[in-house]
Amino acid sequence: MTNESHGPTLTLQAHAKINLSLDVLHKRRDGYHHLCMIMQEISLHDEVHLRLTPEPGIRLTTNAGFLPVDQGNIAWKAAERLARGAGVSLESQGVAIHIDKQIPVAAGLAGGSADAAAVLKGLNALWRLGLSLEELQLISLPLGADIPYCLMGGTALAEGIGERLTPLTLAKPFWVVLVKPPVSVSTREVYEALKLDEIEERPDTLALIEALAQADSLTMAGAMANVLETVTIPQVPEIGELKRRLLALNATASLMSGSGPTVFGLFKDQEKARSAGEKLKRLYREVHVVHTLRRSQ
Ligand SMILES: C[C@@](CO)(OP(=O)(O)O)[C@H](O)COP(=O)(O)OP(=O)(O)OC[C@H]1O[C@@H](n2ccc(N)nc2=O)[C@H](O)[C@@H]1O
Ligand SMILES: Nc1ncnc2c1ncn2[C@@H]1O[C@H](COP(=O)(O)OP(=O)(O)O)[C@@H](O)[C@H]1O
């Protein structure tokens, strides 16, 4: 899209993710953890507006007043890293980024990573760089372990620290009720507090992959688990209560997403999801009724 008076513009949807499973296999020497997890793109999204400007540098604005609008914003870092990696000078031209934030922040939904992925995709197009998905994923990894997945989307198995990705089949979509309790958790602190030798319940990743492909929701529900709950539930018992509440409201399965604190319930039926969402809205401020998405490219 081109707007003569303001320079070329592009608007992208930056979708959140949930983790249908999350297993931590071991801690690496660099402090990062080797993972095996199933990621699922959902319809909840931020809008990322990009505009090339004659003024030099990166300018970032957002409707979320508490987010950084400088190098502290992961979307800002993504633009700078791509420019440096691709040899685009930000001294003779610039880019304006506006983030319309809808995804709860620091919630285990990868909102920041989704914004960064949208900036990389959008500037790859606006700057006509012609970089492949794999090249963008390589550039993105040092900025955040979830960004390579966010660039890809859909349903995927993520291994390594999140960068080894295999697309998976989700035979039937789900309605997803998200509830973010009003607490903050730091991803780094959750990983640091994890005691690998004390984990009793792990996901059955292979059974889950098969169940997702066969739309076998009974096997699916039994195979799902997130080992990071062993850290967060003792700290925030509300997370465990919310899981039980969602199951009592007819969810097929319920889990904490990522490092939390957001809890989601999967529903086959839209009406049941809506009704559960309405009941939970009486108790929680941040409730979203959304659905799973297939990979778009
Ligand atoms: C837990 C997960 C699950 O999808 O998501 P979120 O809850 O953040 O959405 C991810 O592993 C989070 O990915 P992301 O949030 O991109 O992580 P980064 O910014 O790269 O790292 C934040 C911190 O988490 C820890 N970290 C992250 C990834 C990993 N495989 N091992 C780790 O130990 C490191 O201490 C790091 O300093
Ligand atoms: N564009 C952005 N959107 C959200 N958070 C951001 C962004 N840029 C930087 N951050 C910072 O990154 C941290 C993690 O944010 P987020 O990606 O929403 O959480 P999570 O890693 O739990 O999915 C927050 O503390 C926030 O201040």
Image (spheres, helix red, strand yellow):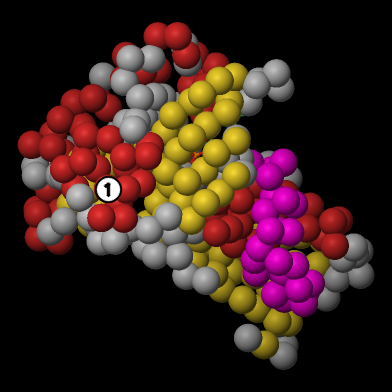
Q: Residue at x 65, y 78 (%)?
A: 9
Q: Residue at 58% x, 58% y: name it.
A: 151
Q: Which residue is mark 1?
A: 211
User: Mark 1: which amino acid?
Assistant: Ala
Residue at left 61%, top 44%? 163
Residue 70 visible in the current orientation: no
Mark 1: few/some/many CA within 10 Å (<14, 14-19, 20+):
many
Classified by dominant secondary structure, the portion drawn in magenta counts as helix
Asked if 283 appears above or below 97 in the picture, the reply is above
Q: Tell me where residue 206 appears, x and y as whole percent.
A: 37, 39
Residue 225, image x, y percentages:
32, 31
Q: Does any portion of residue 161 appear in the rendered image?
A: yes
Under circle 1, the secondary element is helix
Left or right side of 215 for 235? right
* Total residue callouts: 1
**Quarter of the displayed picture in which ligand 1 can be seen:** top right
Quadrant in which residue 222 is drawn: top left
Vertical position of residue 267 compared to residue 226: above or below: below
Q: Is 122 within the magenta? A: yes
> Where's residue 226, x and y in %?
36, 30
Q: Using the image as rendered, state which of residue 46 and residue 204 is in the foreground.
A: 204
Q: Position of residue 12 (x, y in %)?
A: 54, 70
Point out the stretch of residues depicted in magenta.
121-144
Seen at 70% across and 18% down, the residue is 29
Point out the residue furthest to the bottom here. 4
In the visual, does 285 lie left or right of 277? right
Taking 288 as reference, is 27 above or below it?
above
Left or right of 279: which side holds 210?
Answer: right
- Relative to the observer, which residue lies in front, 25 or 82? 25
169 inside magenta stretch: no
For the N terminus, the quadrant is bottom right
